[in-house]
Image (tube, rainbow, N blue to C red):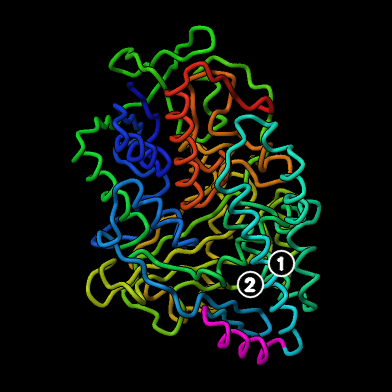
Amino acid sequence: MKTAIIGGGIGGLMSALLLSRQGVDVTVYEKESHLGGRLTFVERDGFRVDQGPTIVLLPDMFQKLLEEAGISRDRYELIPCDPLYSLEFPDGLVFTKYPDHDCHLTEMKRVFPGEMDGFLRFLKEGNERFEIGKESFLEESFVNPLDFWKPVNLKKLLKLKPHQSISNLMSRYFQDDRLQAIYALQALYIGGNPFKAPAMYSLVSFAEHQFGIHYLRGGYASLVPLLEEELRSRNVPIHLNCEVTDIPRQGKRVTGVSTKDGLRSYDSIIFNGDFPGIDPLIKRNRTREYAPSSGCVLLYFGLNKVFEEVNVHHYVMGESFPAHMRDVFDKKKIPDDPAIYTFHPSKIDDSLAPEGKGVLYALVPVPSDTDIDWKNEKEWINGLIDRLERRAFPGLREAIEWMEVRTPQDAEQFGLHKGGSFGVAPTLFQSGVFRPQVKPYRIDNLYAVGASIHPGGGIPLVMQGAKLASDQLLHDQKDPAIKGGNVHV
């Protein structure tokens, strides 16, 4: 059986590894000059900083999936972050999250006295919800939507409180508005609005405490050469600078891929581009419009020093987190006073820059799907640097050797849906059975993986999606009479 994988992002690479290990003849097509998709580096003058994902969540899932793909744990190193991160507010309040629960409770008592009982309830109920969500949703696909609507599944779904927003759920545990924001902002990791995304996504903030936050030594993107090396050792063909321009169809089957080198026939195809981009390739009129996730303005710095006093992960919060979210998701305007996330891995990894120097990454959630011309917003971007220097990185401007900026315009040009950085938005009706599935259409041999595909965004979940897609393809191969496809898309 010959399978073409369109896109060499983490979903495509994991699909190729999982399938090739089962004897499937796979070929990878990547339109860029390198593999990895958003999991890549910004590199310059001996500096290297992750361009996209920075936080390793769900380490057990991450490692088990890599092992299933043939990557043993001794080939990479995960470093637990302790503290997890700090959040600094304009009034001078600084709150630090710790992986050790006793240390964290001590910090809660110091900064937010009276909130400890709520935190313990958050952990207890979060553990119950996580077990339900992992078994019933993260590890299951809904190629047949009827599987989702079984009474037993609906009963479990209600325990995940999909009718509530994450923010509303957090207000049940915490009284202080700042603490509510601290435990709701994780929806932004997958481009969601904490004030509207379903409460099931509160599992992200729970996972931080239950499983910790980890750093992949060498940078998250250092995983890509490892996966590529394994694929090449198996003689898997990888075509770089080779964009797929057409996927011919005959009836309910796709027959191959067209590239600059011509048409090649395949028995099945896995699409790893941002999902809404599949329709033009298969000559299908889009029957559903997807709301994009939030966009990002990303600042990458090469520094002549390491800021030892700042945690690897740090948040510089604005005066009003709700106002920032309204600007991003409702008003679709440049936020006046945004929260800024920073990533300074050089504090624990000296391999990312020349000796004595460091790298810094800053991210600001901004609107997607707008006509904002980010090239004309240099003054606003300079204001971000001023705030970082004033609030968290004293002497930052003098330390900068170089800087690069990426915006939603760059993301859209790269191929991300309407400039959203995290696939389609994690809204209620774009989650679970309502999200594009690993077998997205009633086309017998077409599959999909990626952040826009169930179970969703974040590297471990995209890897899990690759497993679901691979399992479905192998299952269909054994029983070619099986039909399917998500009727909702």
Classify mark 1: residues with Cα within 10 Å, few (<14), some (14-19) or many (20+).
Answer: some
Vertically, is 465 above or below 377? above
Task: Name above or below for residue 330 compared with residue 454.
Answer: below
Q: Residue at x 36, y 25 (%)?
A: 4
Residue 479 in the image, given as x and y percentages of width and height: 47, 21
* Residue 317's disc number: 2
* Residue situated in front as seen by the camera: 419 or 240: 240
| Residue type at tag 1 | Phe
Q: Which residue is mark 1?
A: 321
**Contact check, label 2 and label 1, Cβ < 8 Å:** yes
- Magenta residues span 99-112
Between 1 and 223, the one lying in front of the other is 1
- Residue 285 is situated, as x and y percent measured from the top left of the image, at 62, 17
Q: Residue at x 71, y 84 (%)?
A: 116
Q: Secondary structure at mark 2?
A: loop
Residue 236: name its quadrant. Answer: top left
Q: Is residue 229 left or right of residue 384?
A: left
Residue 350 % position (x, y): 27, 73
